[in-house]
Amino acid sequence: MHVSELAHIIDGHRAGYTLPQSMYVSQDVFDHEMASIFRDTWLFACNAAEIKAPGAWLTIDIGPHAIILVRGRDGLVRGFHNSCRHRGARICLETNGQSPRLMCPYHQWTYKLDGSLLSARGLSTDHGDEQIALKPIAVEDVCGLIYICLADSPPPFDTFRNAVAPYISPHQLNHTKLAFASDQVHNANWKLIIENNRECYHCRGGHPELMKCLVEFDLPDAPDANTELLDAATMRWDKLGLPYAPVPRNTDFRCIRLPLNPGYLSFTLDGKLGCNKLLGDFKDPDLGSLRMFHAPDNWNHFLSDHTMHARVTPLSPSKTLVRTTWFVHEDAVEGVDYDPQRLAEVWLATNSQDGHLSEINHKGVQSSGYMPGPYVPAEWMVQDFTDWYLAHLRGYCDDGG
Amino acid sequence: MHVSELAHIIDGHRAGYTLPQSMYVSQDVFDHEMASIFRDTWLFACNAAEIKAPGAWLTIDIGPHAIILVRGRDGLVRGFHNSCRHRGARICLETNGQSPRLMCPYHQWTYKLDGSLLSARGLSTDHGDEQIALKPIAVEDVCGLIYICLADSPPPFDTFRNAVAPYISPHQLNHTKLAFASDQVHNANWKLIIENNRECYHCRGGHPELMKCLVEFDLPDAPDANTELLDAATMRWDKLGLPYAPVPRNTDFRCIRLPLNPGYLSFTLDGKLGCNKLLGDFKDPDLGSLRMFHAPDNWNHFLSDHTMHARVTPLSPSKTLVRTTWFVHEDAVEGVDYDPQRLAEVWLATNSQDGHLSEINHKGVQSSGYMPGPYVPAEWMVQDFTDWYLAHLRGYCDDGG
Amino acid sequence: MHVSELAHIIDGHRAGYTLPQSMYVSQDVFDHEMASIFRDTWLFACNAAEIKAPGAWLTIDIGPHAIILVRGRDGLVRGFHNSCRHRGARICLETNGQSPRLMCPYHQWTYKLDGSLLSARGLSTDHGDEQIALKPIAVEDVCGLIYICLADSPPPFDTFRNAVAPYISPHQLNHTKLAFASDQVHNANWKLIIENNRECYHCRGGHPELMKCLVEFDLPDAPDANTELLDAATMRWDKLGLPYAPVPRNTDFRCIRLPLNPGYLSFTLDGKLGCNKLLGDFKDPDLGSLRMFHAPDNWNHFLSDHTMHARVTPLSPSKTLVRTTWFVHEDAVEGVDYDPQRLAEVWLATNSQDGHLSEINHKGVQSSGYMPGPYVPAEWMVQDFTDWYLAHLRGYCDDGG
């Protein structure tokens, strides 16, 4: 599909309505998304604590992009394309591991953790003048959250970093460890999964477990805001010096601290802590939830006792991986301070429900009778996301693809 | 694929021969079929007795078309696209059900049985001026057979209705009930399944069960017609006032009553009735079989004791659903008057055999060595079908697609 | 994809480097390969001993090409497209069989073993003037190896035949019988499987079983050649009159006899014979291995006690069948002279390992980070293959596709 055709589809979008059908189902649009949004913007990769030791690595596959993230001996996290510079074989086959060097399993070409070629048996020195190294990608670390960008010239990252760092840093991600991980693959376009996440209009009908914990209002000045609950919470947060006010509205990211429902300290069915050892220097367990979303693919909750990170990874136009990870204090003891299953059960149920809803959404959207429909006012964050999406795609078209 | 290319393929067809390869295997041709034949012509949906009560509904998926058929409080059957006017989610998830209203499971938008929007929590009244309702499709009912058309301006239905009603009405479908249903998915193009149905040239080699019941000749004046059997039958039918002569030959539909083999009252292995309670006002069990075909997707048998309807639904160029349903008198008692398995066994075996034959046909047709081959004279109804198909597709091309 | 675009991809290839990405993953390139390389060149089919008796047949599916090979009453092997000239159905459904005639299972049209139509019930004589017969393909037999070509005007075969016949004929394939067959389907492009086969650079790291038997050097004058081993072997072969010198280097085929490792008479884990009854007139069991490769799809090993033939058959851009067959003397007795599992175990293990390596190669090559990489000098035969491939494809483009 030529970018002029993509631009034509973008032009066909009606403000305040869901996207045109082809944006949800077309392989051509998907391919353009992989060449634009999933190449040119910052994508969430992982909590840096997942690869804490030198040589620890993990792999991420985003559509056609196969990525290795690895911690160097110098403590820095680097990213590379997961393809050997010899015959192109995949180098790291598992989802994660740890090794002193990166060795291709095909012909044992071996790379240092900084990506440079260490050895290649029998390679002619004719190629000695040209630098053979793993193809790098850009990596940023904000308070222990790793973001990556596959573009040769990544866009600025500092506006986001500066805005969210004060909110996140008290949770001290660098002193956390992975407590639980869930990979769910849903038969739905990735944007339907993001749209689903950006509104709680469906929560009442769809999420009995989550609705025990989560307040339904999304802004302090929302018409349905519980001001009594809010005032009590902000007084406590002010005393602790924890920022909570929403960052100025923008379509790139959102960051806000909101209370949980009365009686709920964490995302657990009984409202008690999911981990008795609190994060960072926290003493007060009642910190509500710091919610942070970063377009296009990442949402997070930071609580007093754990953090939860979700990454939405497109696999095809109709198949998407949602990876969710839960982190607790690195000194917390499993079976003593926390039970991983109990820590995760509210969001595991919620993610399964969201997966089902996204799948029936996809099924309906791919039918010939689908017509873009109107967002209701409560879906303003969905609109922010589709606005971000369309603006980015339009910029890509304007640049000639 | 541009329609000019499709027209070029049509031009390449040689009269009296099977269709060009791409018509059986190409996704592009399939997409055009879905936008023409499966949008602009009348398709068989179901026996109306499947949705007898107000609020009873069933769903049909035809390629990209997702349809709901629902009986209203006023007794009328209506059809809608199965996609919510909010965010497009699929509304009815199951194949059939019954409910006082149609509610989208995503955000609980609720529609009346006539498709109009009843409630949508939080919907801004900004959209109040524009009619939000489920997108309707055209529905026709001929003697209890429901046909649908997805076109904005459906073609006339009355020629067909007027021609076949006298044949069908004595079987009183409105006083039947579903006795058995079979869904078989075959890895073959839908047209190969129709072609297979339109000739009995393969019956002798392929259908031992069916050949016990079915006469092989297909017209009273066929060279192999059993005139003795025929004369005895028509004398009986004349006495009962049942029409039997074939409707004038046309490519849209066929309707004819023919006797079964001597000693056979129904499509059963032993020739006895499949249901002891006869349909309508019938007293005589020996009525042969009223055969009715309607292009592109439906064939039926109406007997003294039951009716059988087959719907051929394309799922992809190489995958087709054949749904077959058996109906008996609504007052017949299962286990007393009929055994569903016994009622269906001849055609269940036949359908499986036809599925296998269509699959080996598809396999050979998709190979590079396939060349269109000559129909034999006994395949005159296959030719009628391909003529109908090509004429319709040519009209679509002439109209610019 | 227009051939001009294919030509553009060919032009983008850098000499001495692996192929451009699209050549390994694109459906369009695959379709062109099926219309060029897999139509216009000689492909390996089987050892003729697989269809020894009149009426014995086997089927081969190569991408869209469905082929029957059958032995006639006159002893000749013929090839036909596996599609009935009536409605196109597949005629032979199994992988192999034996029958006095070829009968289509759909309407029982029946063909003689030479492809001519024997009977077609009810076929109008209007078609009598035109010859209805199975569509033939070209077949060549070189010392019992059957090659086929689907082109109307196949390229010359004699250069190959004349060059390799003196090497192969002493092994007397016509007096062999099938001892074991293995069909492995790998999720990799067929060229990656061929490339993998054309170098032993990966053997040391990947094939512990094979490396017990196989010498790693590939030419008598290779830098790593074991001259002591080689001199002893050639002296023996000279005495027996067995040719061993490599045929002059060319990209169409390779043929050379090389010794096995000291102490190894056959491809077995203990080095002992895999079959105690030797092939042909051989008395000396220590004949090393005659290696013969024929582009694009076939490699072989001919030993004193058995032969092994591999056929690489593309199924889709990312799926390939590797069929390997082992043959022993026709008079050898299973369980007495040979144990099929023991005969095959070294190469079964090797093929599985190669399949895995090809799959990780494909996985990396299909990622967006893949860049063509440099072949090392030890991969000269891989370069010969890609040179052959590119030259053939360029010729196809020059001819207008």
Image (tube, coloured by chain):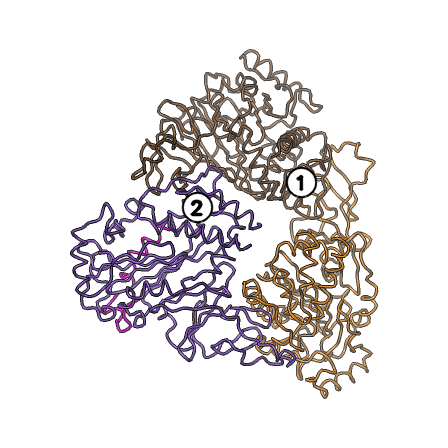
Chain colours: A orange, B purple, C brown
Q: Residues within 10 Å of mark 1 (few under 14, many from 20)?
A: few
* Residue B294 in sight in this render: yes
Location of residue A343 (image quadrant): bottom right
The secondary structure type at the circle numbered 2 is helix
Is residue C294 or residue B236 the one in the foreground? B236
What segment carries the magenta color? B327-354
Residue C281 to residue A22: above or below: above
Location of residue A163 (image quadrant): bottom right
Q: Quadrant of the C terminus of chain B?
A: bottom right
Is residue C171 or residue A112 the one in the foreground? C171
Q: Position of residue B29 (x, y in %)?
A: 52, 50
* Residue B353 in sight in this render: no
Q: Position of residue A303 (x, y in %)?
A: 72, 74
Amino acid at circle 2: His
Tell me the distance, in whole angstroms, between the alpha carbons under discs 2 and 1.
31 Å
Amino acid at circle 1: Glu
Residue A317 to residue C136: above or below: below
Whether the magenta-drawn stretch holds residue C151 is answered as no
Q: Position of residue C164 (x, y in %)?
A: 55, 19
Question: In the image, which disc is placed on residue A274?
Answer: none
Instruction: Tell me which residue sits at (59%, 30%) in the image.
Output: C212
Residue under pointer 2: B362
Q: Position of residue C265 (x, y in %)?
A: 54, 24
Disc 1: host chain: C
Say whether residue C6 is left or right of residue B119. Answer: right
> Which is in the foreground here, disc 2 or disc 1?
1
Question: In the image, which disc is placed on residue C5?
Answer: 1
Disc 2: host chain: B
Say whether residue B272 is left or right of residue C176. Answer: left
Whether the magenta-drawn stretch holds residue B342 is answered as yes
